[in-house]
Image (cartoon, coloured by chain):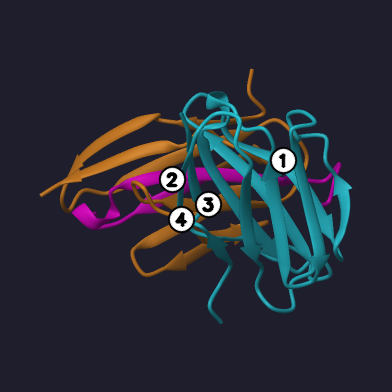
Amino acid sequence: KNEVEQSPQNLTAQEGEFITINCSYSVGISALHWLQQHPGGGIVSLFMLSSGKKKHGRLIATINIQEKHSSLHITASHPRDSAVYICAVKTTSGTYKYIFGTGTRLKVLA
Amino acid sequence: DAGVIQSPRHEVTEMGQEVTLRCKPISGHNSLFWYRQTMMRGLELLIYFNNNVPIDDSGMPEDRFSAKMPNASFSTLKIQPSEPRDSAVYFCASSQFTQKNSPLHFGNGTRLTVT
């Protein structure tokens, strides 16, 4: 079993839909990253959070440390949101160590 | 800030050739990471530098891979000799280690194809 699990692996949505991507982890963490990667593109950090909730534009990230779970929500989705979303946890065992989820491939149709 | 800068963006080479990938981290960042991304294995840490010193190279696949960081603003990842199975996207990332939970900043990656 992977230490960081994301669901779903693939997601297709219609423009305007509310989208939720989930990340569960089994290790102790000091922080969690949500990353975005467009096809053939670089990796962009969307959020880094260690508790509670963060919001940036149409994106919202939440984390529940007790349940070892985080969600990334996209409101009013748009085709330009189509990308791979990767959850990465910064472990407490090694202060530099990140464990990456396998990513959720999102496609938003116009 | 220009962000993390990697070069080249694409590299196509023949098996057996030497390949050198380059990275300029964000100014002021003292942690630098080299990652490899493949469809099968996702993102894997190859090596981590802190203050230009290699701290963890346990992810380097084998002796054909080597990495250096001669100063705070430059790092290289070298593969010699290259093999087709080295084909992947190689990412460099940097962060500020002394800042608690400083986020990772990735470069645009180098797509390596070894034929």
**Comparing labels 3 and 1, the label whose residue is closer to the camera:** 1
Task: Give the orange chain's letter.
Answer: A
Marks 4/1: CA distance? 19 Å
Q: Are marks 3 and 2 in contact (CB under 8 Å)?
A: yes
Q: Which mark is residue B35?
A: none
- Is A92 situated left or right of B90 in this image? right
**In the drawing, what numbered circle is on residue B46?**
1
Which quadrant would residue B18 be assigned to in this image?
A: top right
Res A61 seen here = yes
Q: Is residue B58 left or right of residue B5?
A: right
Please report contact status of discs 4 and 1: CB closer than 8 Å, yes or no: no
Circle 3: element type: strand
The residue that mark 4 highlights is B9
Magenta segment: A71-96
Instruction: Same chain for labels 2 and 1? Say yes or no.
Output: no
| Separation of residues labelled 3 and 4 (CA atoms) | 24 Å
Colour of chain B in the image: cyan
Q: Which residue is mark 3?
A: A34
